[in-house]
Amino acid sequence: MDKLVINGGKALAGRVVVSGAKNAVLPIMAAALLVDGSLKIERFPHLRDTATMIKLLNIVGATTSLEGDVLEINASTVNKPEAPYELVKTMRASFYVLGPLVSRFGFARVSLPGGCAWGPRPVDFHLKGLEKLGAKITLEGGYIVAEAKRLKGNRIPFEIPSVGATGNMVMAAVLAEGITIIENAACEPEIAQLCKFLNLMGGKISGIGSAELTIEGVNNLRPVSITVIPDRIEAGTFLMAGAMVGGITIGDTNPAHLTTVIDKLEQAGAEISIDGNDITIKKPERIKAVDVTTTVYPGFPTDLQAQWIAMMSLADGTAVVTDTIYRDRFAHIPELNRMGANIKLNKNVAIVYGQNNLKGAPVMSTDIRASASLILAGLAAEGRTDISRVYHIDRGYEKIENKFRSIGADITRETEQ
Ligand code: UD1
């Protein structure tokens, strides 16, 4: 197993370019299953999760070829609409294939994901939504079996917005008969891009980016090419690194997707300037304590909560960080505390008592974003930090140590025996 070794305290400088967004490309890859033909995805991020999705596409019978950062998918050969437990348990987003498979083939067998490091993550909205569209859903040996001759449009009111369930329902409804209206839909840019992609292919979706999506079913879609939007979570992670240890430019990103994060960073004292798709950030003399509550887009993303806590560990004062999306997503706190942070957790509220400095220590990665927070802490800490189980970070960040090294960090990957 690999670990990352960081010698902290080095100031960062230079420009770093973000990759295509993981959470945008995964549903786009699943949507390729809706088309009889070959399509291209550009700015494809090389991640563990995208490799898992390629494996899954191949298992169901699609052919794929990857050259540089262009992935070509041909789903005209799909012959086995089934997602095995071995893959779904390693990546919950595999569940995205359920909607497209049942919609196009009238049948899908997809393993239930099971538990997650950050508490219960149910898929009930996905299943209730598909039932609304007329699918018969049964559970067989841990697998969801969904069947429908042809899905029929309907009104799907979600209790709360769900990124995954919205994406799954849009993909299911695009080839359904009649009109589907999704109420309380997720407004995240990654879902907006999925909808735009489906429309490019001939889908009829309106209300994109709003909480109500209207999908008029079509009979078939045609293959097209798409360039994945920049990863706003990766950009946000680099922005926080800049606020903690440097003056850096985050390149080829979309500042419009980061307004809340930029606003919070400015409140924390960072100096930020935007030039087209580049964001430059300068570290303040001392970070100010700023409270954050995660909410759905355009609010502060839960996927940057761990990194914000790492940054607030060095603030002048006390910050309250509340996660309303995933209430148990705090496995990074005991690890940060091992590095000298002082963070107390009360249910879904972290109280971060800012310290003058952090100290390097051996720590353990528990999930993608928790690992990113440990890297930030390691970069700012005095001395050496060893982060083990980095396969978690490889799920969602492309060549993270190379990117940080290119802007001056002392970070290397070692293979543990
Ligand atoms: C996606 C992102 C993840 C991000 C999360 C919230 C991907 C691949 N992953 O995850 O990085 O942290 O959005 O922005 O895009 N819920 C239910 N029942 C369901 C589905 C969801 O109760 O059937 C609840 C969840 O427990 C959670 C909330 O809805 O409290 C939002 O979850 P959701 O938006 O679905 O997250 P994911 O799509 O799994």
Image (tube, rainbow, N blue to C red):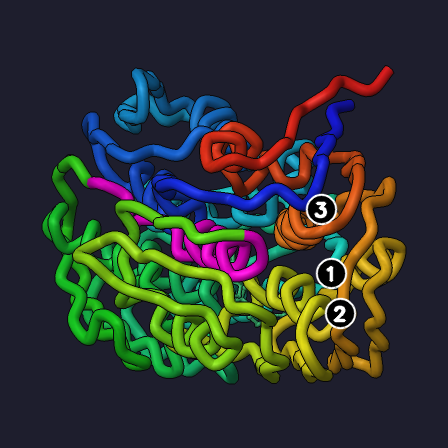
Q: Position of residue 83 (x, y in %)?
A: 56, 36
Q: Position of residue 26 (x, y in %)?
A: 42, 44
Determine the residue positioned at 44% across, 43% down: 13
Look at mark 3 in the image and give the residue it sits on: 378
Q: Position of residue 191 (x, y in %)?
A: 34, 61
Q: Quadrant of the C terminus?
A: top right
Whether residue 332 sits left or right of residue 28 in the image: it is right
Look at mark 2 in the image and give the residue it sits on: 328
Look at mark 1 in the image and give the residue it sits on: 118
Determine the residue positioned at 51% across, 28% down: 402
Type of amino acid under label 3: Gly
Quarter of the displayed picture in which ligand 1 can be seen: bottom right
Between 153 and 241, the one lying in front of the other is 241
- Using the rendered view, name the quadrant where residue 19 is placed: top left
Write the start and end of the magenta stretch as one range: 227-245
* Magenta stretch holds residue 31: no
Q: Position of residue 303 (x, y in %)?
A: 56, 61
**SS class, disc 3:** helix
**SS class, disc 1:** loop
Type of amino acid under label 2: Asp
Q: Is residue 372 shown to the viewer in this render? A: yes
